[in-house]
Image: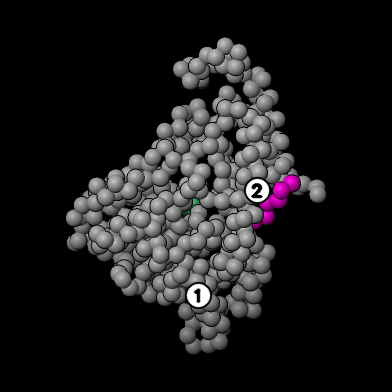
Amino acid sequence: MAIKLPIYFDNHATTQVDPRVIDAMLPYFNEKFGNAASRNHAFGWVAEEGVEEARAQVAQLINATPKEIVITSGATESDNLAIKGVAAMYREKGNHIITQVTEHKAVLDTCKRLEKEGYEVTYLPVEKDGRINLDDLRRAITPKTILITIMYANNEIGVIQPIAEIGKIAKEKGIFFHVDGVQAIGKIPVDVQKDGIDLLSISAHKLYGPKGVGALYVRRKNPRVQLTAIIDGGGHERGMRSGTLNVPGIVGLGKACDLCRQEMAEETVKLSGLRDRLKNGIMGKLDETYINGSIEHRLPHNINISFAYVEGESLLMGINDIAVSSGSACTSATLEPSYVLKALGVGEDLAHTSIRFGLGRFNTVEEVDYVTGRVVETVERLRELSPLYEMAKEEGIDVSKMNWKTA
Ligand SMILES: *Cc1c(COP(=O)(O)O)cnc(C)c1O
């Protein structure tokens, strides 16, 4: 089968909209264009029906009820609403929030904002495998703790946190538990009951739906969570998030969730097979390559590998017909390596030469084999040019003690 270039292996950044999702959305741009808040005519009713069906589809994927689904513009907004909404509503009860260092910026920056407003935030460290230590969590809890916010799975390394265990601890202590579920929902089973989750952030464009739409699950009983809104006006979404609903987007979110629910089991087998083929293909041919984060507690479609003795930028340039992400922020204003890899204790050199491979629904085995070949050939070529690699191989010099940047 002919391969179409460039190849997309960056499915943690965003995903292609599934054609079946597009088909579901299309009527809501024209013949069903009504405002879902219009209560007096059929145009409004039809739009509202589409929204309510989508709400039920989202709820079903995570074992919630439709009334517990608040539509937002995406997971950044969901994270903000969950954290700021609980912080403001329960300020009398306490001002302490617990999170961890490898969260997405939507959580970390929200917490930093709250610190400026007088809240206290504990940022738990992670172990070498990328997971938090539950004893650290227990020790961090104080009588002032109102919220624990820990992501389900990390967007760089795909590492899955012990969510059900955290949910149990939160429940025992009477603390609300928010989870940024973006990377896990639709990919692995996420169940707000079994996992003890009180608030859950969802984004459509990470699960083959459209951009700019998402949801926040807000538990209604055992316990009931109340939120202070951050967007006022009109009282949509039971007062928690005002604004005219993005009906086509919401219908797309619902359809995307429905497809994930039906196809998850099969898709997991396919994607973990492709991922393992990629990992084994690359690591079987190249020495001095390292997997970042737990392999056991990991999303089926993620692998993040560091390549020693190559330069990060040269590596990315060498495989520029493949869309991946790197642990190096060289392309942005700073030269800082990924804060996620740093938190795992990965050295700067290996962080700069790490690559995140994010597989998805539309990837094929032919693409995996092509990418494997390109990566292996590029790393081998770069290492041939590397005096450090040669020294290490021939003379056994410990290059980790050398200054990499001047080399
Ligand atoms: C992409 C992502 C977000 C942000 O979601 P948007 O819908 O793009 O705002 C938040 N958290 C994680 C873990 C993500 O991967």
- Please give the count of numbered marks on the rendered protein: 2
Q: Residue at x 42, y 33 (%)?
A: 345
Color scheme of the displayed model: one colour
Residue 274 x/y as whole percent = 65, 48
The residue that label 1 is drawn on is 56
Q: Which amino acid type corresponds to the residue marked 1 in the rendered image?
A: Ala
| Three-letter code for the amino acid on which mark 2 is drawn | Leu
User: Residue at the location (35% across, 73% down)?
Assistant: 220
The answer to whether any part of residue 183 appears in the image is: yes
Residue extent of the magenta highlight: 361-366
In the image, what residue occupies the spot 58% across and 13% down? Answer: 391
Q: Quadrant of residue 378?
A: top right
Where residue 247 sits, quadrant-wise, is bottom right
- Residue 294 colored magenta? no
Q: Nearer the viewer, residue 55 or 130?
A: 130
Q: Secondary structure at mark 1?
A: helix
Q: Which residue is mark 2?
A: 274
